[in-house]
């Protein structure tokens, strides 16, 4: 019976190690170039390879090249939301102050990448399926994910007391995580127009290595880029919180009146 | 190349989104860093002076 609270406390103390804003700012500053430059290199390599050197598909023609943008965006749309849910857990269970700031910053980036996934999927769908949109299980569940991101952004700003906004948004983030397995398995559970996954954790990829490599490079590049933008935005949010604290400190005259 | 307009639209959207997000984050970071440095300097200077005359 005592093991569980100890584990929670230990995990909490591990996460709280980086709750100190000064420590996070130092770590973030050190991490930033290691995320940013590889992100640019991997993305340019992956997209350049995909655009100019990888072969056209025998059925889809050159429109298959849209995959090098669409698939990483789709993976990050779900991955970003998983990050948001994790921040929600950290916020609700351990009251981690940085988790709330990170959640505020992940939301808009995740919404943008989900919008990119939907837009590129739609652009690919027009020449391949003959329509911009179908109410297919995969497409609809990703659209729901986009609305969850928008709901999170709106909810976090909906309260006068920011702490209440953080709590409500954290609950939404955790509850909305139920959409992630639905997105993943929608192509297996329902008869969808969207094709099944070409890359799975358990089986060999069903695509040629000449397409798999540029896809892997662009996925790594997009993921590092997503992390770089979130870290930069979270660093800025920490600084803004410090600025607000300084402005309201008695020495400045803001809070001593 | 087949379907060129669709490919250009997809890559263009991705490039615009990446530019907007990364430039936005970089500019925000630069502005906040400068503002925080200026405030901390003022705060540290005032730290030596008493609160009440």
Image (cartoon, grey):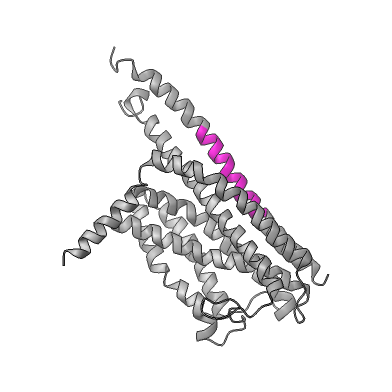
Query: Can residue A169 be seen in the rendering of this structure?
Result: no
- Image quadrant in which the C terminus of chain A is located: top left
Q: Which sits in the foreground, A98 or A202?
A: A202
Q: Which residues are magenta?
A: B16-33
The spot of residue A137 in percent (x, y) is 54, 80
> Residue at 29% across / 18% down in the picture?
B51
Residue extending furthest bottom? A191
Q: Which sits in the foreground, A48 or A147?
A: A48
- A198 relative to A161, above or below: below
Q: Which sits in the foreground, A3 or B17?
A: A3
> Residue at 37% across / 24% down in the picture?
A252
Residue extending furthest top? B53
- Image quadrant in which the N terminus of chain A is located: bottom left
* Magenta residues, dominant SS class: helix
Examine the structure image and report whether residue B20 is included in the region drawn in magenta: yes
Q: Which sits in the foreground, A173 or A13?
A: A13
The spot of residue B30 in percent (x, y) is 56, 36
- B42 relative to A63, above or below: above
Examine the structure image and report whether residue A135 is included in the region drawn in magenta: no
> Residue at 60% across / 64% down in the picture?
A73
The spot of residue A9 in percent (x, y) is 24, 56
The spot of residue A219 in percent (x, y) is 60, 63
Please state if B48 lies on the left or on the right of B7 as rendered: left
């Amino acid at each position: 019976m005592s093991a569980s609270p100890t584990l929670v406390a230990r995990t909490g103390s591990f996460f709280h190690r980086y709750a100190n804003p000064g420590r996070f700012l130092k770590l973030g500053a050190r991490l930033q170039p290691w995320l940013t430059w590889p992100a640019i290199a991997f993305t340019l390599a992956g997209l350049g390879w995909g655009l100019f050197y990888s072969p056209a598909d025998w059925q889809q023609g050159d429109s298959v090249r849209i995959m090098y943008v669409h698939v990483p965006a789709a993976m990050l749309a779900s991955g970003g939301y998983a990050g948001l849910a994790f921040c929600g857990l950290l916020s609700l269970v351990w009251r981690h102050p940085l988790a709330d700031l990170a959640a505020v910053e992940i939301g808009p980036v995740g919404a943008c990448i989900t919008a990119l996934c939907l837009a590129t999927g739609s652009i690919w769908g027009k020449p391949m399926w003959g329509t911009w949109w179908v109410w297919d299980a995969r497409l609809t569940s990703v659209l729901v994910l986009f609305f969850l991101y928008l709901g999170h952004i709106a909810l976090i700003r909906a309260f006068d007391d920011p702490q209440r906004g953080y709590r409500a948004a954290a609950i939404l983030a955790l509850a909305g995580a139920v959409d992630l397995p639905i997105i993943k398995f929608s192509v297996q559970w329902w008869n969808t127009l969207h094709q099944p996954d070409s890359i799975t954790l358990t089986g060999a990829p069903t695509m040629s290595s000449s397409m798999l490599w540029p896809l892997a490079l662009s996925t790594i590049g997009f993921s590092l880029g997503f992390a770089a933008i979130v870290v930069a935005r979270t660093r800025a949010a920490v600084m803004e919180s410090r600025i607000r604290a300084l402005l309201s400190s008695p020495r400045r005259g803001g809070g001593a009146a | 190349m087949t379907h060129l307009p669709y490919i250009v639209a997809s890559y263009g959207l991705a490039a615009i989104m990446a530019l907007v997000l990364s430039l936005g984050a970089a500019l925000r970071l630069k502005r906040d860093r400068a503002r925080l440095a200026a405030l901390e300097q003022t705060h540290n200077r005032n730290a030596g002076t008493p609160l009440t005359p």
